[in-house]
Image (spheres, rainbow, N blue to C red):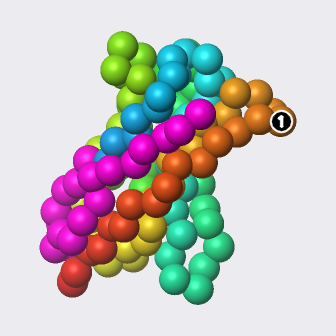
Amino acid sequence: VQLQASGGGLVQAGGSLRLSCAANRNIVSFNTMSWHRQAPGKQRELVAQITRSGSTNYADSVKGRFTISRDNARNTMYMQMNSLKPEDTAVYYCRADQNLFQGYWGQGTQVTVSS
């Protein structure tokens, strides 16, 4: 399985970005898909998660600002990020979990928010 993340970039505080994660297989086969981020010197953290049925969960720090979605027809997951803050600066990774024991990481995409 290959996951290709894209959409990162440099944006001013208050701006928006949309990240995409394209899979090379049918994403319906994944129980969950998620976005994680890792800032310099910090541990990787879960940002948002979406299940096969469309249920979503968000880290408290991004609730109300980020929206995760998936387009099964395009085999792609998205995350719309609005009202970006400097503390959102990190490398963002997408992940797909087929079950509790089998998951896949995409490469990271850098998001930098300037103040």
Camera sees residue 67: no
Q: Quick one: label 1, few (<14), some, or many (20+) residues within 10 Å?
A: few
Q: Mark 1 points at which residue?
A: 101
Residue displayed at 30% across by 74% down: 112
Helix, strand or loop at mark 1:
loop
Q: Residue 13: percent from the left, percent from the top?
A: 20, 73
Q: Let me know if residue 9 is in the magenta part.
A: yes
Is the C terminus in the top left, top right, bottom left or bottom right quadrant? bottom left
Task: Say above or below: 1 vs 6.
Answer: above
Question: Is 86 situated above or below 102?
Answer: below
Where is residue 100 shown, x and y percent of the image? 81, 33
Q: Residue furthest right?
A: 101
Compared to residue 50, the image places residue 72 above or below, namely above
Q: Position of residue 16 (x, y in %)?
A: 19, 56
Closer to the camera, 45 or 19? 19
Residue 57, above or below 87: above
Name which residue lies at 27% across and 52% down. 7
Q: How many labels does the image show?
A: 1
**Where does the image place residue 11, in percent across and percent down from the top left?**
18, 69
The quarter in which the N terminus is drawn is top right
Asked whether, in this view, residue 63 is left or right of residue 83, the answer is right
Q: Is residue 39 left or right of residue 87?
A: right
Identity of the amino acid at label 1? Phe
Residue 46 seen anywhere in this rendered image of the structure: yes
Q: Is 79 displayed left or right of 34 in the figure? A: left
Question: What residue appears at the point 67 percent right and 34 percent down from the top-left corner?
Answer: 97
Magenta region includes residue 12: yes
- Residues in magenta, as a range: 1-18
Report the residue at 33% width, 50% height from top: 6
